[in-house]
Image (tube, coloured by chain):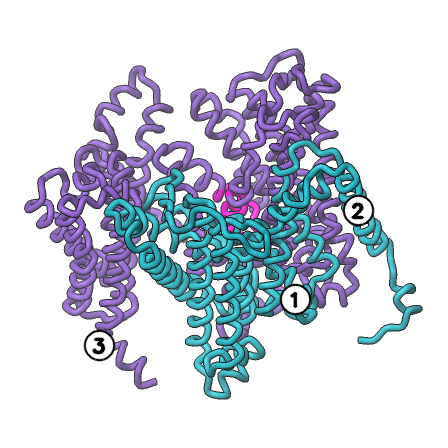
Amino acid sequence: MERTMKTETRLDWRDVINLGLLAAIIALSLSVIGVVGTFGKRDIIGGVITMGHVFLFGAAAGGAYLAAQRSKSNRAGPTLLSGLVVGLLASLPLIVLILVAEPLDLRRFMHNVSPELLATLTFGQGQGVGIVIVTAISAVLGMVGAGITLIPARILRPLLWGLVAVFLVGLLSETIILAWGNQGLGLMIRGFMFAARGLSILGAATVFLIVAGLNSWWGSKGGLIRERVNALPPRQQKNVRWGGIALGILFMLFLPMFLRTYLSEVVDNIGIYVLMGLGLNIVVGFAGLLDLGYVAFFAIGAYTMAVLTSQGDFGIAGLSFWVALPIAVAAAVLAGIILGVPVLRMRGDYLAIVTLGFGEIIRILALSDALAPIIGGAQGILKIPNIFIAGTEFVKPEQMYYVILGGCLLAFFVSWRLRDARLGRQWMALREDEDVAEAMGINLVKTKLLAFASGAAFSGMSGAIFAVKLNSIFPHSFNLMVSINVLCLIIVGGMGSLPGVVVGALVLVGLPELLREFAEYRMLMYGALLIVMMLARPGGFWPSAVRKRELDVNPNGSLPPGEENLIEPVLQEG
Amino acid sequence: MQRTMRQRFENINYLDLLLWVFRVGIIVAVIWGTVATVTHNRYSTEQWLNFLTFGLAQGGLYALIALGYTMIYGVLLMINFAHGEFFMSGIFTATVFIAIPLNESGFTDRHPIWALLIITAVAMSVSTGIAVLTERVAYRPLRKAPRLVPLITAIGASFFWQYFFRGLYGSGVTAFPDVALLKGTWSVLGLDITRVQGVVIVTSLLMMTGLYIFVMHTKTGKALRAVSEDKDVAALMGIDVDRVITITFAIGAAMAGVAGVLYAMMYRQVHFFMGFFPGIKAFTAAVLGGIGSVPGAAIGGLLLGMFESVGPNLFLEGLGIAAPYQLKDVIAFTMLVLVLMFMPQGIMGEPIAEEKA
């Protein structure tokens, strides 16, 4: 008790120094593994700040913010001082790096300690001036990070939203320019908003003002609007909701018209992952069975489609897409059940490793010479024909988009209906406690196999579409990384949450597709993201309703008032 | 729980039947393949012995890594997915910063033993450091969380470290310098084994014996066993559970660090992905031997190594499968599935699949 009193009134300097050292380690690591250098070429505000700098100084600002938040001190002096200390500590290893990189020829050991990295670190100003700049910025950002805790939320929120918007628009400026086109008004806006790379300073200011303004307006008026909607009779509320959904679907229908071929391609890839994510969401999110070999079903769907439709050497039937699709899905479902049976009695971590083994077995088999006469081995299967709908050949990504969208909507609808159906509630009971679920009369074998089968069905469908989209498949497309990607996206989105899958796919698949630099560090960031999400936000960015309520449970186990009866029925009715 | 024969038969359902069919199918396939290979006389006795010694060396590596899995599983009941990365990080760092410069300066040629010892020491300390850091950041805060949660962070940590070291030292394969001392063969009991394999086998056996003595006959080892028995009671007995867990991670990772050096000597290369498959296979070995048991990990590792090196030629080739060597990973994974299905307690372990897993 005495200790907590102390920390409320006085800063805990050990904490501050620890956080400063942590920030220092992060900044140094990001530099030497090449993140800073690589992203140093991605301008956010043209010629002023790059993504590399955001990574570099993000550690200082973040560490300072945490330090200030932990100290809970309301006085400006000590808070800013702690921020300054964190900032200075964070800049220390960078200074050392700038000084020793060349004399010690560090590049010999670590190939990313390159001249580009040093240029980013010193802002291209040479050693002496560079060190001063780095130290100053780090210190100032440390103080800013700590100072944030002093600003009241009413003012802080629009500021942060404005900054985030500038960051995102600047980061994605290349894509936005691409989508905008080159004619008329678009060109004018573009000239005003964007520099050669990234936002122009004027553009950044505009974005900031618009978003911050909108946010502060919503802050003052948003509650009122929400209240008014809530005050409507239930019937009309429903209408509003359906109207929203209809608008969303309309938007999705016309999306490819705004996007060009390249962006449609990106959206197609996101869609393929959404489809897989929805399937894995049933297995992991609903039923709580951690499946790391999920790519196996994707591969089986793709290979079935390829073998059935290919016009090349390995095609056996020459069927059309629409005839082959149900067969591919059925093959995946069958595989789901076959792989599901042996693991029925395994729990948790064993299940994870065994399914991982299955995934690898499928990949190795696809790659092996033993099966090469049937499915082509490392050469893969070529000449998979396109889809025909009503005599039109679907070739371009803009056209494939509709096929994928159809698949996603179907999968979304099925998971949404299943979630609240008897089966869905059984899955969730299974997830919470297998023994209790069994005692409640749930047939574990049937429920688990149905989870594996429905997950596999979506994955198989996804694989089938994937094969047609590429017109050829190779075993290398079906490696473990796919399983991990899908797992990451449902964890980041929120396990068991359907919109979460879409959010996760947008962030984890969309961003690396749009920013080439991400490709190199994709898995690094996924790994870090998995840890950080589990530590800080176990429900994901868009937690499912049930999960949200669970996370709101107080540490001592009691539910917030009025919600005691919300979780139990889910378990009891199952 | 004791059950009579009759009760057993009454409880059999179609699922058990299916599993039995599966089991019998596999056994028949293995026997069929073996008989076919043996009757065709494809390989000479000497070749078989070579496969065996290679398998023994490989198995020693798996066993060393498996020890870490088993110990960590013992105290935390958690599969430390990132263990393969502890193995990789040590030797990768030691190769880039120590082995290559030492070799270039000629030190390795003049004092090969010292060079190897320095490399081993560095690899062990880096592995240990990474392990302790991972435990502190990614596992310790989640010790009370549902079991899926630390498993997910472990997967995250695994990929994080892989790509961290990829960014640090590059994505290519780095050659581990040759040590002249380790070239050539030794003749043991009329059998020629390469020196590297000999060193690998002897070192891993020594390390395992050392660990066994440590766990069974020192005070810290006793604390470690107490914690793996029951954390809460151990804490009541005055054992600092956090410290013991850190020590467990450190020892497991140090073993993995040594295994890394042996791996580099055997395959003469290191890369960022090298920890992944040995990691999973060592886990298989740990399960095979009975997870949680130190001698079990040793036995499981040696067995798995031998199955993997002999298996493709023994059963797969007999079944008429082309290029069976490509399928050696399939053998390891199939073994994992089979062991977990039919013998989840492993060779030396207690039955845990139901209560703890």
Question: Which is closer to the viewer, label 1 or label 3?
Answer: 3
Which of the chains bears the disc numbered 1?
A
Q: Is residue B288 left or right of residue B107?
A: right
Is residue B206 depicted above or below B159 in this figure? Answer: below
Disc 1 and disc 3: Cα gap in Å? Answer: 44 Å
Provide the secondary structure element on which disc 1 rests: helix
**What amino acid is labelled 2 in the image?**
Ile
Provide the secondary structure element on which disc 3 rests: loop
Q: Nearer the viewer, residue B162 or A424?
A: B162
Is residue A134 depicted above or below A563 in this figure? Answer: above
Q: Is residue B123 left or right of residue A76?
A: right
Give the farthest residue toward the front: B190
Q: Which residues are magenta?
A: A485-504
Provide the secondary structure element on which disc 2 rests: helix
Q: Residues within 10 Å of mark 3 (few under 14, many from 20)?
A: some
Which of the chains bears the disc numbered 2?
B
Position of the C terminus of chain A, as image quadrant, is: bottom right
- Which mark sits nearer the N-terminus, 1 or 3? 3
Which chain is displayed in cyan in the rendered image? B
Residue B34, x across and y down, in percent: 76, 44
Q: Residues within 10 Å of mark 2 (few under 14, many from 20)?
A: some
Return the residue at label 1. A568
